[in-house]
Amino acid sequence: MNPAGRSLHAVRWLTLGAIIAAASITAMELMLSLAVLTWLARLLLGRRRDCLPDAELTILLGLMMAWNIVSALAAADREQALAGLPSGLLLLAAPLATAVLTSHDRELVRALMLLEAGLLGLWAVVELLLWWDGNPLLRVRGPYSHHMTLAGVLLVLVLQAFPRPSLSPLVGEPWGRRLGRLAVLAGLGGLAATMTRSAVLGLMCGLATLALTSPPARWRRWRLLGAVLLVGLVAAAVSLPWLPRGGTQPPPAAVASVTDRLELWRAGATMVHDHPWLGVGPDGTRRVVVGYLDPNYRRPGIPSHLHSAWLTLAAEGGLPLLALVLFFYGRSLARGRSLLAWGRESDLVRGVLAALAGFVVMGFFEDNFDDSEVLFVHMITLAVVWQHRGHGAAGSDAPT
């Protein structure tokens, strides 16, 4: 293997290492940083053609970062806004994956993520049964700092493995399929253990996406199954806060959760109204939201987001940033549909579209863009629909 081939393989293995280390933000970001630096060095100093990212994807993500910088420069507290700029490292994970991961790598990544879902799910179930003290504010969170992070990661990892979960790239057949199903069940159990209603709703929408993208020959069966899942999961999502007490009245924590979201959404809408073009600047919610809250409203601390990724994007970056992000997801959906129409890696693409739907829906109620671990697995997963079409590293076996 020549030096150019060795450098590209180094980037691939560092990228895979970051995916394996997704349960630890420190290890994940370290491996991803090394992968990005090695990749950029190759682009600057070596052959470029075999490791170029998808151009449209790179431009769209670059525009998002550029608009955040403009928003920060226009903010009243410019210095603090610049310090609060979101990390571009996690966004670079998507173009990196399109550039250096092969078709075989994509199947391997899918299996690695499914294995992580199973392990994290088992951790969450054990934590719920043995260590959780019943405090609804400190629920099962696994290796992460918050239960919503664990729920978001599990949501993406589990949905991307559908509709045919398998660990075959890791352990071969027939054990790959058997262990894959067990990993999905463990991941779903862990997701339920977090008691995160927004993740349950996201899961429901992800499964509905699988039903909608199923082959025509199986449409009737999937439509019936989708309807049953829709009703069951909506009922679970609505009733979950009431289940721990077994009564008809919601527990105080559930009431506080709903009240807090409504108050933050009202404040966020006012922020967007007052700053529609450039917002209040990156990470600006924690700096200005107190002035938008009802003076009589009391909460434990100053919120860092508005409990909605979409509202937070609009409030901090303005409506143009929100429109840009929505356009990005619209293009991702369109490319996914094109891949399905061509019959390319249909199971893999359907899982990615399901994970995309789950992430987007959960974002209505949580700021999952601000969770580095969730955003990382989301970007790596989403890279599948931005893969190169028939040429380059992403469309063939690894170059040597």
Image (cartoon, rainbow, N blue to C red):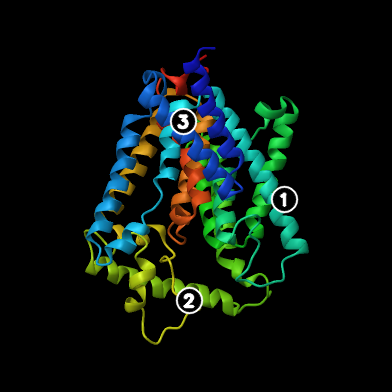
Q: CA distance from mark 1 to mark 3?
A: 35 Å
Q: Residue furthest right?
A: 130
Say few, some or many: other residues with alpha carbon within 10 Å of mark 3 (under 14 / 14 to 19 / 20 or more).
some
x, y (%) of residue 323?
28, 50
Mark 1 or mark 2: which comes first in sequence? 1
Q: Quick check: 303 left or right of 134?
A: left
Disc nearer the start of the sequence (1/3): 3
Residue at the disc numbered 1:
122
Q: Amino acid at mark 2?
A: Gly
**In the rendered image, which quarter is residue 251 located in?**
bottom right
Q: Measure the C-alpha gap from mark 1 to mark 2.
A: 32 Å
Query: Residue at the spot x=51%, y=53% of the render?
Result: 202
Mark 2 sits on what residue?
301
Circle 3: element type: helix
User: Looking at the picture, does residue 364 appear above or below residue 328?
Assistant: below
Return the residue nearer the eye: 52 or 57: 52
Q: Which mark is residue 38?
A: 3
Numbered circle sitting on residue 347: none
Q: Position of residue 246 (x, y in %)?
A: 69, 74
